[in-house]
Image (cartoon, rainbow, N blue to C red):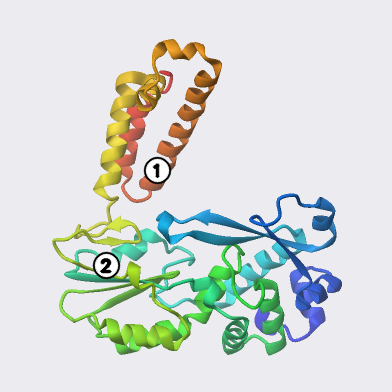
């Protein structure tokens, strides 16, 4: 049985493998939000007896832009239902070709491929993408997908907090893509056929070698569907300038590339690690003298920093391996020569 075949509460409960009392509580919004900014001491008995949702904050890459608000289910049954729904929705939702984010076999590399070596690239960012999507929009979109209206309402109750989508729930990306279908279709219908359009979650990309990119028209369509453009992130990148799509350089005619700055920094760090070893490299970075190693706290600091540096470098290399495997392998081999050199 898939979500399109469900018409009763009993069938929906069987599909989710959850208790009726749990679904009733979710429908009544009987959950507790544990805000990390406000709740310092949490009574763990509350977590056991309620539908608890943690709310925490992650600083954005640009600190001046504030924090990203993330919600995390602390209730096993809610988390299980969301994962089940995510799988169920994936089985019936067929994304448009332009949708690149949170789609099977699509990623930042496939997104960048679409916009390689174009004369002009326009990038737009939708402000508070998930948090702008309302419960009513979700119900309407799921109903248009063919899901029973009552079932659509139950799904929206499981996936929303206070009537809106949130970042952090496993159901949010696919529901956001489903809600954005009509917006994507209208954009494709109204732009010139020589313009390439992709959307990676809240990031929209347009590229062309000839046609003008009509920002006014695109903005009008986006706002029609209840979204707002983050003007501070709007960029028009022309050939000859730096051009990036989902963080990858697209100047090359054949493949997306890792930005030169990142590769240069990794090469330099690998060089110093090869020359001095991890320990002395870290000491030089932190301006620590050898005689200070007698201090146990400083010694522990260096050991900790070595672990952090290794994790960071190998994390980058793992990511780069999917984009530029030859570069990743070369740096990895250089680092292996110093693996025992601390």
Give the residue drawn at x 38%, y 60%: 108
User: Residue 158: image x %, image y %?
Assistant: 70, 73
User: Residue 191: image x %, image y %?
Assistant: 28, 85
Label 1 residue SS: helix
Quarter where residue 337 is shown: top left
Determine whether, in the image, residue 144 is placed left or right of residue 207. Answer: right
Residue 284 in the image: above or below residue 255: above
Q: Nearer the viewer, residue 66 or 166?
A: 66
Mark 2 or 1 closer to N-term?
A: 2
User: Which residue is the site of mark 1?
Assistant: 316
Quarter where residue 105 is shown: bottom left
Determine whether, in the image, residue 204 is placed left or right of residue 56. Answer: left
Q: Nearer the viewer, residue 71 or 312?
A: 71
Asked whether the residues under the numbered discs 2 and 1 touch, taking CB atoms below 8 Å apart as contact, a structural biologist would say: no
Label 2 residue SS: loop
The answer to whether residue 214 of the structure is visible from this angle is: yes
Determine whether, in the image, residue 333 is placed left or right of residue 310. Answer: left
Identify the mark at residue 115; answer none if there is no mark: 2
User: Residue 181: image x %, image y %?
Assistant: 47, 82
Residue 29 in the image: above or below residue 64: below
């Amino acid at each position: 049985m898939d979500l399109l075949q469900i018409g009763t509460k009993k069938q929906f409960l069987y599909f989710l493998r959850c208790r009726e009392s749990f679904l009733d509580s979710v429908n009544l919004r009987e959950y507790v939000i544990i805000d990390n900014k406000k709740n310092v001491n949490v009574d763990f008995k509350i977590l056991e007896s309620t539908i608890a949702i943690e709310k925490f904050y992650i600083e954005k890459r640009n600190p001046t832009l504030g924090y990203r608000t993330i919600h995390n289910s602390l209730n096993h049954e809610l988390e299980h239902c969301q994962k089940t729904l995510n799988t169920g929705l994936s089985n019936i939702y067929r994304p448009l070709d332009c949708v690149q984010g949170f789609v099977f076999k699509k990623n930042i590399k496939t997104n960048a491929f679409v916009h390689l070596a174009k004369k002009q690239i326009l990038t737009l960012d939708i402000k508070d993408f998930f948090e702008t999507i309302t419960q009513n929009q979700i119900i309407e979109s799921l109903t248009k997908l063919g899901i029973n209206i009552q079932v659509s309402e139950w799904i929206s109750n499981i996936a929303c907090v206070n009537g809106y989508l949130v970042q952090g729930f496993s159901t949010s990306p696919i529901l956001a893509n489903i809600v954005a279908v009509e917006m994507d279709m209208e954009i494709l219908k109204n732009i010139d056929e020589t313009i390439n359009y992709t959307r990676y979650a809240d990031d929209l990309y347009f590229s062309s070698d000839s046609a003008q990119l009509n920002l006014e028209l695109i903005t009008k369509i986006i706002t029609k569907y209840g979204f707002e453009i983050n003007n501070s992130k709007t960029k028009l990148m022309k050939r000859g300038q730096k051009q990036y799509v989902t963080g990858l350089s697209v100047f090359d005619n054949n493949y997306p590339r890792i930005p030169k700055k990142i590769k240069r920094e990794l090469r330099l760090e690998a060089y110093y690690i090869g020359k001095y070893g991890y320990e002395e490299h870290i000491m030089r970075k932190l301006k620590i003298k050898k005689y200070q190693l007698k201090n146990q706290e400083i010694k522990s600091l260096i050991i900790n920093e070595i672990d952090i540096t290794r994790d960071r470098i190998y994390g980058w290399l793992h990511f780069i391996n999917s984009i530029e495997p030859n570069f990743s392998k070369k740096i990895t081999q250089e680092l292996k020569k110093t693996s025992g050199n601390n």
